[in-house]
Image: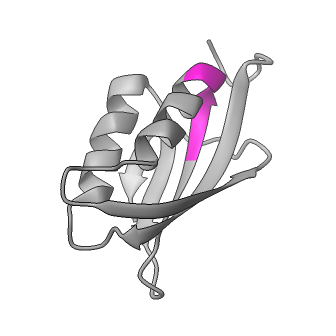
Amino acid sequence: MTPDTPEWVRKRVVIVGQVQGVFFRDSCRHQAEIRGVRGWVRNRSDGTVEAAFEGNSGAVAALVGWCRTGPERAVVERVDVFEEELGGEVTFRIR
């Protein structure tokens, strides 16, 4: 599947809770690579983690679902999800 297929989507998520200092970004990158999802993840100054996921709708949905739990040491309180226009991501990176 390629970005010009109807099944290709982009979601931006903001993960709220104890999500910094628990390997959330690196674990997210690993989960994205397993699923073939492109985009990025970063810590925000307010203590949340933000990410953009681009790829097959099923793979993106699975990654958003993973964010609701995160890595073992994370305590996720809430995940806000926003639909976005495709951004042409080619890899997944930690910002």
Magenta highlight range: 53-58
Secondary structure mostly taken by the magenta-highlighted segment of the chain: strand
Query: At 39% across and 36% down in the image, what residue appears?
Result: 32
Residue 5 left/right relative to 61: right
Q: Is residue 42 magenta?
A: no
Quadrant, the C terminus: bottom left
| Residue 64, position as x, y percentages in the image | 53, 41
Q: How is the image coloured?
A: one colour
Residue 70 sits above or below residue 2 on the image: below
| Residue 91, position as x, y percentages in the image | 44, 40
Residue 48 left/right relative to 27: right
Query: At 35% across and 32% down in the image, what residue appears?
Result: 33
Residue 70 left/right relative to 11: left
Residue 8 left/right relative to 36: right
Query: At 41% across and 82% down in the image, what residue appears?
Result: 47
Quadrant, the N terminus: top right
Residue 56 sits above or below residue 80 on the image: above
| Residue 50, position as x, y percentages in the image | 51, 65
Residue 34 sits above or below residue 64 on the image: above
Q: Nearer the viewer, residue 67 or 43?
A: 67
Q: Nearer the viewer, residue 92 or 45?
A: 45
Query: At 58% across and 31% down in the image, what residue appears?
Result: 61
Q: Nearer the viewer, residue 35 or 78?
A: 78
In the image, farthest residue toward the top = 1
| Residue 48, position as x, y percentages in the image | 46, 74
Badge count: 0
Q: Nearer the viewer, residue 62 or 11?
A: 62
In the image, farthest residue toward the bottom = 45
